[in-house]
Image (cartoon, helix red, strand yellow):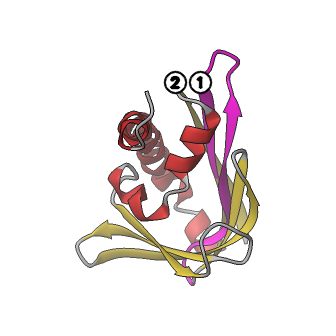
Amino acid sequence: MIERELRSAISVPHAPEVVWAAVSDWSRQGEWMLGTRVWIAEGAGNRPGSELAAFTGIGSLGVLDTMRIEVWQPPEKCSVRHTGALVRGTGGFVVEPDGAGGSRLLWWERFELPTVFALGWPLAAPAVEWGLRRSLRAFAAFCRNYRTERGEQ
């Protein structure tokens, strides 16, 4: 196994509690996460041991990613263990206040790749990084709408 890590962050002009509520709303992640649909597979989805599933792809062609929440510390930190046949490793996000009333959202993924897949990582990594950055930019817009939907000013 070879580990490869991706990290991306974005500033969001909303309080950490709003950012946390938006980023941890699993059923709505597909509204901002590129080509992905997420659902709670087991448990409440808001505590360690809860299981999540995500399908990333187009139509029926894609990858199923199963996860188990390992750390749940609202409104600051969530980490998951990827437990699927293809996607293995850990991932998560951290929400930090930025000192100006907004937040910084850091999203990270640490993939455990079989050696044969690791050889292709240099070709795949730029596309995966682009998708993550694009998704986080979409998240900032989603968060603004999410705040309005919650009746916050």
Q: Is residue 74 left or right of residue 131?
A: right
Disc 2 residue crowd, few under 14, some 14–19, many 20+, Cα 10 Å: some
Residue at position x 43%, y 27% in the image: 153
Is residue 74 placed above or below 40 in the rendered structure? above
Contact, mark 1 vs mark 2 (Cβ under 8 Å): yes
| Relative depth, front residue between 136 and 110 | 136
Residue 54 x, y percent position in the rendering: 46, 71
Q: Amino acid at mark 1?
A: Gly
What element does badge 2 sit on? loop
Pick out the residue farthest to the top.
Answer: 100
Is residue 59 highlighted in magenta?
no
Residue at numbered disc 1: 102
Pick out the residue farthest to the front.
Answer: 151
Q: Quadrant of residue 109?
A: bottom right
Disc 1/disc 2 C-alpha distance (Å): 4 Å
**Residue segment shown in magenta:** 85-108
Residue at position x 22%, y 73% in the image: 59
Residue at numbered disc 2: 13
Residue 43 x, y percent position in the rendering: 62, 81
